[in-house]
Amino acid sequence: MSTFSILYNICYGGLSFSEFAIEKLAEMGVHGYGPYDRKLRTNKNMIDIFNEYGSKLVSGSCAHIDIITLDQKYENYYNIEEYDGIENIVVEYDKFELDQKNERDSQIVKILKSDKSNEQKIEEITKLMED
């Protein structure tokens, strides 16, 4: 299973990265980011720094950064909800399932409209439904 990780803040104050973390990123040859850059939350180098040094050294002054790892299939199906700086990762499972169903339905229509024999169509649709 392929996965991806997201760094997020779990305390009041808001997401920020420490100068230590930004310096470590620069040592890796990654420049142009500041301590409040939200793009860092999914940056693979910053995730590696977090995994090596932990929340205490990576979190900014008013942050407590944590990490969540999700199945890659949900990469376009999550939102970050925030209240007073505290963030929650919310996966839109219903939207994912609906998109999967719509894609499968589209494939079924394509198979049905093809010039294949009925036997081939049944076989392909059956295989599609088993996946």
Image: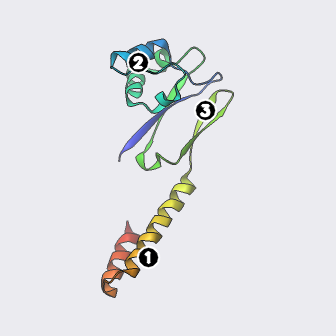
Split into 4 quadrants, where in the image is the C terminus? bottom left
Kindly identify the residue that appears in the image at 44 percent across and 12 percent down. Answer: 20
Residue designated by label 1 = 109
Q: Quadrant of residue 29?
A: top left
Q: CA distance from mark 3 to mark 1?
A: 41 Å
Q: Is disc 3 surrounded by few (<14), some (14 to 19) or many (20+) residues within 10 Å?
A: many
Q: Name the front one of labels 3 and 1.
A: 1
Kindly identify the residue that appears in the image at 36 percent across and 45 percent down. Answer: 2
Q: Position of residue 46 (x, y in %)?
A: 41, 25
Q: Name the front one of labels 1 and 2.
A: 1
Q: Position of residue 61 (x, y in %)?
A: 57, 14
Label 1 close to label 2 by CB (< 8 Å): no
Residue designated by label 2 = 53
Residue designated by label 3 = 87
Q: CA distance from mark 2 to mark 3?
A: 21 Å
Residue 126, above or below 118: above
Where disc 1 sits, the SS reads helix
Residue 10, above or below 62: below
Which amino acid, by three-letter code, is at mark 1? Val
Q: Position of residue 44 (x, y in %)?
A: 38, 31
Q: Residue furthest front?
A: 32
Q: Residue furthest bottom?
A: 118
Q: CA distance from mark 1 to mark 2?
A: 51 Å
